[in-house]
Image: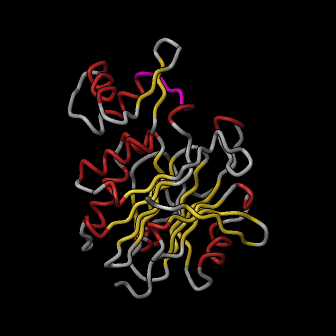
């Protein structure tokens, strides 16, 4: 069983996961808003360099070198993408979320890490498996990965259309037809789909779909942790776009190791 710990910095709270104990990391609460990743990196490791992207609900995963080689959008100066993987020690990678799933990944052998933004669109486009494929190209073995999914909207309160559920479900089943995908998802143990009283709607557990994508890759459930917090149902700690309809976020970040095992 993976343990989630609350930590406090200047009276503000953030979460860590025992699965990622090797790394300086944190799933920060909305209390830290509007601090930037550059500010928050100082909380985790004052010598680390922060990297982030302008998130677009896609599946682009970049390294700091690739970010540096691109010019960002004029208005923000940020490169577009939804995941960052590290290449060197003391690189802090960050992801913003407001109901979508923040995914932090560490490799215990290489010390490399990744931070990914996995909402329903990114999950449908398999951002987590794509990031892991990039890590494998750089020497990662699946058994060495440790993956923590932070606070996000829980399936029990996340109403989506059947079409959205089928689009996300297609990432874990080869069946092409919408209703068959829904039926296949409902048949899974610990199904990511829950019933909704409204016609044409279901409740979708996006974190569970990401876990199933990982298991399909061959990652063991013991290598995966899911935070026991729902952004929508925990207003005292987490901002929820669906609850508040405001453009605010909470940040999650992790720092690559200086001395891997």
Which of the two residues, 196 or 255, is positioned nearer the viewer here? 196
* Residue drawn 29% across the image and 70% down it: 144
Position of 8 with respect to 231 (left or right) is right
Quarter that holds the C terminus: bottom left
Position of 261 with respect to 47 (left or right) is left
Q: Residue furthest bottom?
A: 259
Asked whether residue 81 is in view, the answer is no
What x and y, as percent, mark residue 44?
60, 76
* Residue drawn 59% across the image and 44% down it: 230
Q: As displayed, is residue 183 above or below residue 259?
A: above
What x and y, as percent, mark residue 218?
22, 55
Q: Is residue 205 magenta?
A: no
What x and y, as percent, mark residue 18?
49, 67
* Residue drawn 34% across the image and 59% down it: 222
* Residue drawn 54% across the image and 49% down it: 228
Bounds of the magenta segment = 158-162
When asked about the image quadrant of residue 209, the answer is top left
């Amino acid at each position: 069983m993976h343990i989630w710990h609350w930590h406090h910095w200047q009276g503000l709270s953030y979460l860590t996961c025992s699965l990622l104990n090797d790394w300086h990391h944190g799933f920060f609460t909305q209390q830290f808003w509007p601090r930037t990743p550059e500010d928050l990196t100082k909380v985790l490791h004052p010598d680390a360099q922060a990297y982030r992207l302008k998130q677009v609900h896609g599946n682009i995963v970049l390294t700091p070198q690739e970010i540096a080689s691109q010019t960002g959008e004029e208005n923000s100066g940020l490169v577009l993408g939804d995941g960052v993987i590290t290449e060197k020690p003391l690189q802090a990678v960050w992801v913003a979320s407001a109901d979508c799933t923040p995914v932090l990944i560490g490799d215990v052998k290489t010390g490399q890490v990744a931070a990914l933004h996995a909402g329903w669109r990114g999950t449908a486009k398999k951002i987590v498996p794509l990031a892991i494929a990039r890590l494998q190209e750089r020497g990662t073995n699946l058994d060495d990965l440790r993956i923590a999914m932070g606070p996000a909207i829980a399936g029990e309160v996340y109403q989506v259309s059947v079409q959205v559920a089928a689009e996300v479900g297609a990432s874990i089943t080869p069946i092409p037809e919408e209703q068959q995908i829904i039926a296949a998802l409902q048949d899974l143990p610990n199904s990511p789909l829950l019933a909704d009283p409204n016609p044409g709607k279901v409740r979708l557990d996006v974190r569970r779909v990401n876990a199933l994508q990982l298991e399909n890759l061959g990652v063991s459930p013991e290598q995966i942790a899911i935070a026991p917090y729902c952004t929508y149902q925990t207003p005292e700690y987490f901002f929820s776009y669906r609850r508040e309809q405001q453009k605010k976020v909470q940040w999650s970040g992790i720092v690559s190791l200086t001395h891997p095992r």
